[in-house]
Image (cartoon, rainbow, N blue to C red):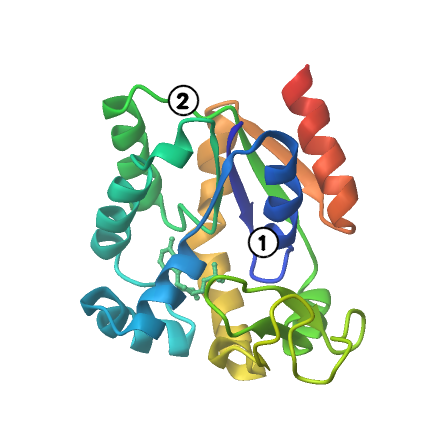
Amino acid sequence: MKIILLGSPGAGKGTVSKLLIAHDGSAHISTGDMLRNNVKEGTPLGKKAKEYMDRGDLVPDSLIMDMMEERLQEPDCKKGFILDGFPRTIPQAEALGGLLKKLSLTIDLVVNMEIGKQVVLDRLTTRRTCSNAACQAIYNVKTMPTKVAGICDKCGSPVIQRSDETEEAILNRLATYNKQTAPLIDYYNKKGKLLTIEAVSSDGVVKAITGSLSK
Ligand code: AMP
């Protein structure tokens, strides 16, 4: 499958992506994860991106497009890909359109995962992420705690609260989403590719997506 997941921070795009890749081996491409890895490794891109990310602002489009142009040409994308957190602006969507044309690829479906603001705040302030870049398992202190406090069940690395998951940063990320990313809903609707789903349960979202793709 070649799909784009749209949805505010905390809509569950990462969880849904992980469930979807189990279906057909498509690559999960999360620009947020890629940027966090660059920050962790202290690459030139990571150094430029960090201050934007910590504030909950978007990283400039040009940096994202350079990173994505390379990523979409890696061999694991041949089977398909799930774009999680990209595109985030109209200029990114337009640049993606040009890039896909150049690579002779087309998107099957754009999924708009809808979720309320209070649910997002509750989900994100209680979310914890494995600090191991190769793992990045997601937990929740209320609904899905680790077996041993603060330690990842899967790999034993410390589990952390992301610096952009404080209440202040989350509110800024939501405002950024409404201003810069929500216009993509209309953009892809006009192209006839949009499926809007209420993102209550990840399994429900996965069913709706696989159902729509098999039509
Ligand atoms: P995410 O994990 O997708 O919520 O992304 C975390 C942060 O990475 C965002 O708040 C942005 O600062 C940055 N980011 C991720 N994807 C993009 C993108 N496509 N364009 C610009 N910034 C991005």
The front one of 162 and 11 is 162
Of mark 1 and mark 2, the one earlier in the sequence is 1
Q: Secondary structure at mark 1?
A: helix
User: Could you say where residue 82 lies in the image, as x and y percent from the top left?
Assistant: 50, 39
In the rendered image, residue 35, in percent from the top left (x then y), is placed at 36, 62
Residue topped by disc 2: 106
Q: Quadrant of ligand 1?
A: bottom left
* CA neighbours of label 2 inside 10 A, class few (<14), some (14 to 19), many (20+): few
**Horizontally, is 84 left or right of 97 in the view?**
right
- Which numbered mark, 1 or 2, is in the foreground of this view? 1
Is residue 8 rendered to the left or right of residue 102? right
Q: Counting other residues with Cα less than 10 Å from the Cα at mark 1, is it few (<14), some (14-19), or many (20 or more)?
A: many
> In the image, what residue occupies the spot 54% across and 43% down?
5
Q: CA distance from mark 1 to mark 2?
A: 22 Å
Spot the residue most to the front. Answer: 156
Q: Residue at x 76, y 75 (%)?
A: 145
Picture disc at residue 174 = none
Q: Amino acid at mark 2?
A: Thr
Mark identifier at residue 14: 1
Q: List x then y, in percent, for residue 92.
A: 31, 45
In the foreground, 207 or 37: 37
In the rendered image, the residue lying farthest to the top is 215
Q: Is residue 140 above or below residue 177?
A: below
Q: Is mark 1 within 8 Å of ligand 1?
A: yes
Q: Residue at x 38, y 69 (%)?
A: 57
The answer to whether 114 appears left or right of 178 in the picture is right
* Front residue of this view, candidates 39 and 181: 39
